[in-house]
Image (cartoon, rainbow, N blue to C red):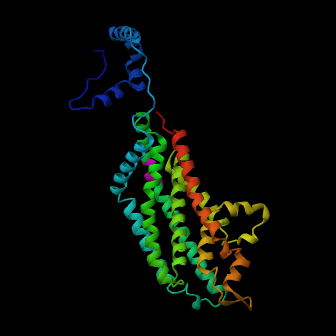
Amino acid sequence: SIPGVPKIKDNYNPATWMLEITSPSIESQLRIDFGIIYEESDQCRMNRELVRELNLPVAGTKEMCFSAGFQQNRWEQFKTCLWKQHLTYWRSPKYNLVRLIFITASSIFCAALLWQKGNEKEINDKQDLFNILGSMYVFVQFLGVGNANSVLPFVATERIVVYRERFAGMYSSWSYSFAQVVIEVPYIFLQAVLFVLITYPDIGFYVSFYKVFWYFYTMFCTLLYYNYFGMMLVSLTPTYQVAMVFGSSVFTMFNLFAGFLIPGPQIPVWWRWCYWICPVTWSFRGMLSSLYGDIHKEITVHGQKTTISTFLENYYGYRYDQLYIVAIMLLAFPLIFTCIFACAIAKLNFQRR
């Protein structure tokens, strides 16, 4: 009905057509203002009269009041979000199947490279010990960073859906956040199991239920906090590309202050706080302390005899009787990253609409 406006084509989306013809470029081209045309139309006057009429409450009615912001309680929202995440993850082999194949292939390569090198009988001097410690350190870092990078685009895509569904009032941000966190656990558990089953017997570590448990627990928590760290980065940045840039910088700092390249006791005092807050520090400490912290075989260090456990304590500062502290810290980092992720999803909105 407005002269100059192009008509809609057959089988064309009406919403798309309306967005196209009401764009500023079309308005300037036609030299019209759709806002002014609407204000001067009969439809605008009728709508205003209808609003005034409906704005007056009917006699005898009470104002609507809701006891809660959502129809279902938090627990039901969480279960619904968890079921949705379960279906999404199950239907996302590009993410989940690939990371399982990746850790399987990496574990096989690690086991082949370090075949029976972890056996205490094969460790005779400082260099033999450094070979096994350095290799395990590199592989743990490699797998953790791989997990963190793979989760970035997946969570970034899910966040777009959350913005829309949160605006519609379908569920709270906290329900989604914790469902997203929980659904990662079984997949990371399976990753840790695959890593332990392949590497532990092939590398030749001492067979003990206690040591196997600690090996699994350390790897599980490591993969867990790397994943949650990646999710946290996505929630704090507008795009996953920006998150990846920040992540690369942080991973470099993790590598520097993990305590392997520069042992903890040798780090300057004014930088040692970075060593203690670095999560990889505790992964490395937990894995090495549990595997070799109680091994008293003598090795040669600079021409002198010392035990493996004594060398770890003097050189790295790792003590077998402090494993309970390591257990607490390895559990604390995933919880901290989870809380930051949930708060950021609830409070930050990077949508530009």
Q: Quadrant of residue 130 in the image? A: bottom right
Left or right of 290 on screen, residue 83: left
Can residue 33 be seen from the camera position used here?
Answer: no
Q: Position of residue 249 (x, y in %)?
A: 61, 57
Left or right of 41 on screen, residue 251: right
Please say if 190 is above or below 90: below
x 66%, y 87%: residue: 296
x 66%, y 84%: residue: 308
Q: Quadrant of residue 328 in the image? A: bottom right
Q: Nearer the viewer, residue 59 or 171?
A: 59
Left or right of 82 on screen, residue 174: right
Location of the N terminus by quadrant is top left
Seen as rendered, the residue at the extreme right is 269
How many numbered badges does the structure rendering display?
0
Q: Nearer the viewer, residue 34 or 249?
A: 249
x 79%, y 64%: residue: 269
Please say if 38 is above or below 206: above
Q: Position of residue 206 (x, y in %)?
A: 54, 84
Is most of the magenta stretch helix, strand or loop?
A: helix
Q: Position of residue 327 (x, y in %)?
A: 60, 66
Please say if 353 is above or below 204: above
Q: Nearer the viewer, residue 15 or 45?
A: 45
Q: Which residues are magenta?
A: 152-157
Can residue 330 be seen from the camera position used here?
Answer: yes
Q: Is residue 90 magenta?
A: no
Q: Position of residue 309 (x, y in %)?
A: 67, 82
